[in-house]
Image (cartoon, rainbow, N blue to C red):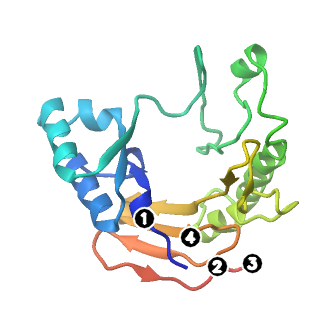
Amino acid sequence: MAIALDRFGFNTVTMGGELGHKLECMKAAGFSGVEIWARDLINHPAGVEKAAQLVKQSGLKVSDFQPLRDFECAPDEAFPIYPEDGMIVHANHWVGQVALTKVKNTSIPRVPESFYRDWRVKKLLDEAGRKLTVDDLKQALFDDFLSPYSVCRPARPNEQGNLSATVAMVIMQPAKGIMEVAPLPAENRVFTRYSLTEDPVLLAEAAE
């Protein structure tokens, strides 16, 4: 199964190294857009102007600017999220204790399954032990509890009538310069491994 990466962008916060190298890798992988992590600009060793010049020269279209990470945000407030045993699990509902005391979970009618998806992924990763492997992460994210309302969402209309789906599962090992991508993981378990030093490799189908 092929995926048209030229329709997608990538976030610089997910990659290690210097900004210029990140942009080169995104371009080489076939992405057309980029979301810029604030630190990649303000902490660039040659200054902000040089960083902005690198972005322009890359030819990638800037879709977003990310000033913060590990926060839950409402229109007028932001609440920090802290790792539990070194881990943060994404959810579509408020999880921080401060947020839960101040704001209402208005997303519940649209994604009530967010509660058990969050719980299931944490449970499976906790059971796998403290030294998680790539296969541990894949098994947790491929969890099919109450499918098709499981962790990976198959294509189905949302409340506006537009098709919505989990576009891809991305497993990264930044220290090794490796990224594995499975497009439309609710229907596909085949990953392509991308590397900073080697050509892309199509991997065997992930176990069920």
Q: Which mark is first along the chain, 1 or 3?
A: 1
Point 60% across, 62% down: residue: 132
Judging by the rendered image, the residue that carries numbered circle 1 is 5
Q: Is 18 displayed left or right of 154 in the figure?
A: left
Circles 2 and 4: CB atoms closer than 8 Å: yes
Q: Amino acid at mark 2?
A: Ala
Query: Residue 152: x percent and y percent?
Result: 71, 60
Residue 100 badge:
none
Mark 3 → mark 1, Cα distance in angstroms: 26 Å
Judging by the rendered image, the residue that carries numbered circle 4 is 182
Q: Which secondary structure lies at badge 2? A: loop
Point 78% across, 44% down: residue: 114
Q: 80 above or below 70?
A: above
Mark 2 → mark 4, Cα distance in angstroms: 10 Å
Query: Residue 57: x percent and y percent?
Result: 16, 49
Q: Which secondary structure lies at badge 4? A: strand
In the depicted view, which residue is nearer to us: 28 or 171? Answer: 28
Quadrant in the picture for residue 91: top right
Query: Residue 30: x percent and y percent?
Result: 34, 65
Quadrant in the picture for residue 104: top right
Q: Is residue 190 in sight in this rendering?
A: yes
Q: Which secondary structure lies at badge 3? A: loop
Q: Which mark is first along the chain, 4 or 2?
A: 4
Q: Amino acid at mark 3?
A: Glu
Judging by the rendered image, the residue that carries numbered circle 2 is 206
The quarter of the rendered structure image containing the C terminus is bottom right
Q: Is 194 displayed left or right of 182 in the figure?
A: left
Judging by the rendered image, the residue that carries numbered circle 3 is 208
Q: Is residue 47 in sight in this rendering?
A: no
